[in-house]
Image (cartoon, rainbow, N blue to C red):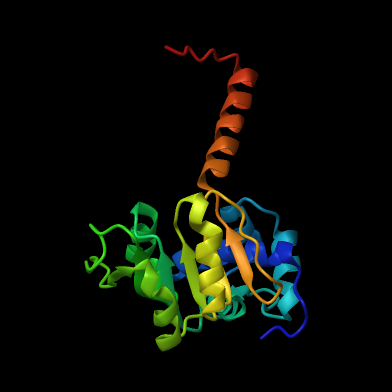
Amino acid sequence: MATKRISDAVIRRLPRYYRYLNALEAQGVESISSQELGTRMGVTASQIRQDINCFGALGQQGYGYNVSELKQYIAGVLGLDRRYRVVIVGAGKIGQAVAAYPTFRQQGMDVSALFDIDEKLVGKSLPSGAPVLHASLLPQYLKEHPCRVGVVATPGAVAQESADILMAGGVKAIWNFAPVDLKVPAPVVVNNVHLTDSLYVLLYMLKEKDMELGVVDEVE
């Protein structure tokens, strides 16, 4: 396992490497060169070698990388070789989608419960198997069932309050889907996922492409 500090830029590229290696392994590919992997991913072989060399000599001259071994190594770097108990605050569509997504469980995220104030949801057990509990029970639940990861899928107005409760209960990592940026102290890590931001970037790219091609978008 890597012992030196890896740059954030490399870490942000590792999930993509892992995704491609996972697909290659499923296809029965045993080894792959940096050139071939780069062609598949649309990046240079030099970039791949530079990134992977951050973790030591994992490839062999004339052979390339062992797909399964490299995938397993990257999984360890990303922490995918561990299991995490997860709670979700907000049992609406996004919260339920996160709870039901099978890949998260496969990668070690075990959603133990969701919390909401909607009486139509409270008391139900979702298809994922996780129960929906009233939000007021979250502090006590965290005392009895320590969790390191919390998901915030609430309206923006209560997102920070929800995060504060999670942190007070010992949660050290927050995956935030609320439309606000959460403020957390240094010991806690947060990843703010703003779906609308991604959509806006996509629409900008579409507009730029239309301008290049002279396409006129008629708005009815």
Q: Which residue is drawn at 55% across and 54% down?
A: 193
The answer to whether residue 99 is left or right of residue 170 is left
Residue 30 visible in this rendered orientation of the protein? no
Question: At x 74% / y 81%, what residue is drawn?
Answer: 56
Residue occupying the far front of the picture? 136
In this rendering, the answer to whether 170 lies above or below 151 is below
Identity of the residue drawn at 61% across and 59% down = 182
User: Residue 27: image x %, image y %?
Assistant: 41, 66
| Residue at horizontal 25 percent and vertical 59 percent from the top | 119
Classify residue 154 as left or right of residue 205: left
Q: Please state which of residues 83 and 72 is positioned toward the viewer in this rendering.
A: 83
Q: Is residue 98 visible to the viewer in this orientation of the structure?
A: yes
Rendered location of residue 104, percent (x, y): 41, 69
Nearer to the camera, 184 or 119:
119
Q: Where is residue 207 in the image (x, y as percent from the top left)?
A: 59, 24
Quick one: quadrant of the N terminus? bottom right
